[in-house]
């Protein structure tokens, strides 16, 4: 691998930006912190960086590659034409170009984007996941509702960032569950997954590597001011609304006081899950620890947020891997896979 690479940093944009577009205005906005942090880290690591934004036309990616074939594509695309389910197609396209690229393979994105598919695979390897069932829009009803033990949580099958998840998503009444499924089908235009609601601590574990993998220090979402007896969950507002977070004392920090044995169990579960799902590069698992210390995988996030102070970056830093080093490691992993 060359020391100084020609890197094409590809991200999605909510509007059209031509090749050679100057992103300095966007870089001042919070929404763009990941792109900005990575752009800077790549530069500081001595690489030549071209940033290309893609909205609804992959033509500009093909043009760019034809004219300036880079050594590496740093893939930050999460949506195409605002659609999460097209994230895998972007990775497929990038893979077909035959250039080393960072992050998850298209297959890994496909598996992780579908919350039922992930759980089916983990179930097969006897890794604990909440009981679940899928309600597709195209069938009247695939599973009898009373198949589940209440309370349950109803979520869009293929979404991210807690879109479509609010406190009303957890229900302990069949009528309300049917209503919630209808909301996901009709208002969000998505299939729904119903899961057994796992009460307990909410943890985030980042794993990096290909063949040799490393589990980074565990993070936790804490809900200091949510009264006992009320469900604590990472709703859309709990993740993204700073006033709401302040009001309910919601903070993300390193998980404290986990008994050594439980720590080992978490690490072991995440390693097994990473291999069972055939993940590469980096992944963040969302976990719940039940009161009887069972470790449940709620979700595997392929290509999770890489902003400097987000979960992966913070956990790497704690493990002694500086942000610039983390970004450089992801590049090495891309070449290793090639
Ligand atoms: N089965 C479950 N039991 C308990 N909490 C859950 C469950 N599923 C989701 N949640 C809560 O909702 C949040 C978002 O769910 P998740 O499946 O990770 O969706 P997203 O992809 O939008 O992040 C979780 O972080 C957790 O707080
Ligand atoms: Mg999640």
Image (tube, rainbow, N blue to C red):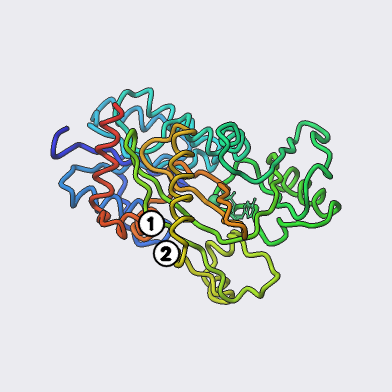
Q: Position of residue 97 (x, y in %)?
A: 34, 24
Identify the residue shown where x is 71% and y is 45%.
Answer: 194
Q: Position of residue 253 (x, y in %)?
A: 43, 66
**Residue 26: in sight, yes or no?**
no
**Front in this rendered view, residue 57 or 260:** 260
* Badge number at residue 295: none
**Residue 43: in sight, yes or no?**
yes
Identify the residue under disc 1: 217
- Position of 46 with respect to 287 (left or right) is left
Tell me, yes or no, whether the two marked residues, 1 and 2, touch with CB atoms within 8 Å.
yes
Quarter of the image containing the N terminus? top left
In three-dimensional space, the C-alpha distance between marks 1 and 2, rounded to whole angstroms, equals: 7 Å
Identify the residue under disc 2: 254
- Position of 309 with respect to 251 (left or right) is left
Whether 134 is drawn above or below 318: the answer is above
**Front in this rendered view, residue 114 or 287:** 287
- Position of 226 with respect to 250 (left or right) is right
Quarter of the image containing the C terminus? top left
């Amino acid at each position: 691998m060359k020391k100084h690479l020609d890197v094409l940093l590809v991200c999605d944009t909510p509007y059209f930006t031509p090749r050679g577009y100057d992103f300095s205005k966007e870089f001042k906005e919070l929404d763009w912190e990941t792109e900005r942090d990575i752009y800077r880290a790549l530069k500081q690591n001595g690489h030549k960086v071209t940033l290309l934004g893609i909205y609804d036309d992959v033509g500009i990616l093909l043009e760019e590659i034809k004219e300036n074939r880079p050594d590496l594509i740093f893939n930050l695309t999460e949506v195409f034409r605002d659609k999460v389910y097209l994230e895998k197609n972007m990775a497929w396209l990038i893979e077909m170009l035959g250039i080393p690229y960072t992050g998850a393979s298209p297959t890994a994105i496909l598996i992780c984007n579908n919350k039922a598919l992930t759980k089916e695979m983990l179930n097969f390897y006897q890794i604990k996941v909440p009981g679940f069932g899928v309600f597709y829009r195209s069938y009247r009803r695939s599973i009898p509702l009373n198949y589940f033990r209440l309370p349950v949580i109803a979520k869009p099958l293929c979404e991210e960032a807690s879109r479509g998840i609010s406190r009303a998503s957890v229900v302990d009444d069949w009528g309300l569950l049917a209503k919630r499924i209808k909301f996901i089908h009709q208002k969000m235009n998505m299939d729904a997954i119903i899961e057994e609601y796992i009460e307990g601590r909410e943890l985030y574990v980042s794993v990096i590597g290909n063949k040799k993998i490393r589990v980074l220090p565990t993070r936790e979402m804490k809900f200091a001011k949510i009264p006992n007896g009320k469900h604590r969950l990472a709703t859309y507002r709990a993740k993204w609304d700073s006033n709401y977070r302040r009001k309910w004392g919601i903070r993300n920090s390193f998980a404290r006081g986990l008994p050594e044995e439980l720590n080992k169990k978490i690490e072991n579960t995440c390693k097994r899950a990473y291999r069972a799902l055939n993940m590469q590069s980096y992944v963040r698992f969302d976990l719940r620890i039940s009161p009887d210390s069972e470790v449940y995988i709620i979700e595997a996030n392929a290509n999770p947020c890489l902003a400097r102070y987000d979960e992966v970056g913070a956990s790497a830093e704690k493990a002694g891997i500086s942000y610039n080093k983390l970004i450089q490691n992801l590049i090495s992993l891309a070449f290793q896979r090639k």
